[in-house]
Image (tube, rainbow, N blue to C red):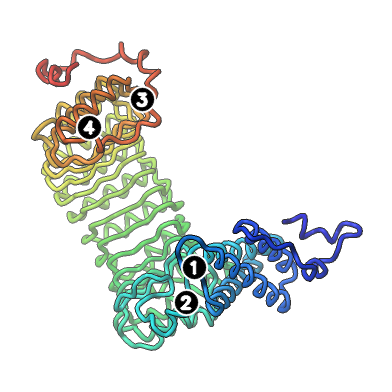
Amino acid sequence: VRDQMHSRSRPGAPSVRDQMHRGWSRHTDEVGLVGSWWHRLTIMADVLAAVERESLVRRASEGLAALSFSREDGNRRLEDKEIQSIVHTVENRAYAAASAAATTTTGARERQESIDLYVKMAAGMVLTAAKQGGIAGTQTAREAGQNRTRTDQGSPIRPGVLDLHSDDRYFVDRQRAEELLDRMLREENTFHTVRLSTKGFGEASAVVVAQAFQKHIQTLQRVDISDIISGRHQQEALKVLEIVTMALEGASVKVLNLSDQALGETGIRACATALQNPNIEELYLENIGCSHDACIALRELLAAPEKLKKLQLHNNMTGDEGATELAAIIRRAPNLEHLRITSSRVGEEGGQEIAQALMGSCKLKALDLQDNLLGEATAHLANALLSHPDLEVLNLSYNCMEDEGADALATCLQTGKDRLRELHVAGNDISEDGIRNLAVALGKAPALQMLNFAENALGDSGSLILSSQLFGERCRSLTHLDISSQDPPVTKYGAIAVTRCVASKERFELLEMNGNCIQAEGIELARELLIQSLGNDKCLGSLSENEASDAEEWEDRVVHDISDITDAFLQNFRI
C-alpha cells in the first residue's frame, strides 16, 4: 500500500490522479474486492479533497454492493439506499477521525499516520458492514421510520438511559453529536443515566453534550464520561472536560466515571464542577494518570467524601505520596463500602497510611489493593480490617506479603469474618509455613466461595495442609479454588489431596491447577474423584501448561511428617 502511495516519486510512474481514474481490476471474491477497495482508498486518502472523497464513496458503494450480492449466508442483500447510507457514514467517520488525529500532537503529526488511520477505519467498517449487513448508526430501508426502540449501537433502548459505549470508536463532530443525543435534546428531565464512553468529543460537540445534560439536570444521577478525549490535544481536551462537567452543576449526580483518559492534575481540576457535587456516592478514576499532584487536587475538590460508598482507582502513578492523599480522603469517608486502589505503585509507607485511614470506619465490604508493593504493610492492613465485620471481598494479590503477612491475615480472619466470600492472595510467596494458620482460619469461613492461591510456594505439603482444613463440611460454600503455578510445584500428591477436598463440595465449579508438575496418573485419579463425587469432571480447569515430565525431581521433597494431617485423612486421599 505504501509503495503504491509513493509511486509518484519513481521516474515515469503515473500520477495519483491518473491511477485513480485508470480503473482497477475488479475481483469477484470477497478478499479481492476488499483488497481492491482498500488499495483505491489509500490512493484517495493521499489527496482527501472533496472530489476524491466523493469518488471514494462511489467506488466503496460498488464494492459493498458486489459483496452484498454474492452473500451465501442466507441473509438478505443490502438495498441501494442502505448501501449509500452505510458508505457515507463510514467515510464521514473515517475522515473525522483522520482529521482529528492530524491535530492532536504538539507540532505536526506525520501525514502518513493520519492516512493510515483513515484507511484502517474506513476499510474495517466497510468489511464489517459487508459481513453483518449494516453498521452501527445507520438503518436499513425496512427499519427506517419503524425502528424506534433501538439505540445508535443497536442495543435496546431503556427508558431514561442513553448508552453510546460500543466497539465502534470514532470522533464525534457537532452534527453527529446532535444525532446521537437526539433523544435527550428532544425530551426534558427524563434521563437518569448517560454513558458517552468510547466516543471522542471536540469543543463543538461538547457543547451539544452540555445542552443535553442541562435539559435533564433535575434527573441525572449516573454519568459516565470516561474515554471521551482520547487523541485530543491537551488544550482542547481540557476545554472539553470543562464544558461537559460544568453542565452538571446543580445535578444530583450519584455515580461519576472519569476513567480511561489522561487527566493528571490539570484534568482533575478541569472536572472541578463535577467533583464538587455533594451527592457523589461512587467515583471511578481508573487509568487517568492519578499522580501525587492529581491526588492532591482530588482531595481538595471532593466536596462531600462522607457520602462516598465506592472509590475506584486503577493503573495510576499514585505512589506512596499519592496514597497519603487518598488516605486523607478515606478518613473523611466513614460510609465507604468498596475501595479499589490497584496497580498504582503503592509501597509500604502508602499502605500503612491507607491501613490507618481504614481504622476510622467499619462498613467496608470490598477491598482491592492487588498489584502494589505493600510488603509488611499487609500486616497493618490485616489489623485495620479487624474493625470491618461486613467484609465480603478481599484482594491482596501480588503485594509481597509473604508468610508474615499470611499469619497476620489469619488472625484477622479468625475474628468473625463470617461474610467473606472471596479471598485473593496470589503471587505473595506464601509457603507451607504461611498457609498453616491461614488454612485453619479459612476452614471457619462459612460463606467463602472463591479462594485464589495461585503463584505462591505451597508445593505438595502446603496443598495437603490447605486441603485438610477445607475438607468436608468446613468451608462448605467453596465453589472456586486456584492453586496454579506454585513454586515448588504441586505434583500428583498435592493435586489428589486438593481434588478430594473440592469433590466434597456439592456446589463446586472450578479447580485451577495449571502450571504445576502433576503426573498423568495424578490427573487421571483427580478426574475419577470428581466424576465419582460430582458426576463429571467439568470443574477441572485447563492443564495445558502442566509439566508432568518435571515431576520426578519434586517427588522426594514431599513432606510426610505433617501433624495437621491424620493417617486416616491421607488414606482417604489414596496417598
Q: Nearer the viewer, residue 361 or 143?
A: 143
Looking at the image, is mark 2 or mark 3 nearer the viewer?
2
Quadrant for the C terminus, please: top left
Density class for disc 4 (Cα within 10 Å; few <14, some 14-19, many ≥20) is: many
The amino acid beneath tag 4 is Asp
Are the two marked residues, 4 and 2, in contact with CB atoms closer than 8 angstroms?
no
Q: Alpha carbon of mark 2 to alpha carbon of mark 3: how far?
A: 58 Å
The mark nearer the N terminus, 4 or 2, is 2
Residue 487 located left or right of residue 405: right
Separation of disc 1 and disc 2 at Cα? 9 Å
What's the residue at 34%, 78% (across, down)?
Answer: 149
Q: Any mark on residue 140, and which?
A: 2
Kind of residue at disc 1: Gly
Q: How far apart are marks 4 and 1 (CA)?
A: 59 Å
Q: Where residue 268 sits in the image (x, y, percent)?
A: 45, 66
* Contact (Cβ within 8 Å) of mark 1 with mark 2: yes
**Quarter where residue 181 is shown:** bottom left
> With 38 as the anchor, is 562 left or right in this view?
left
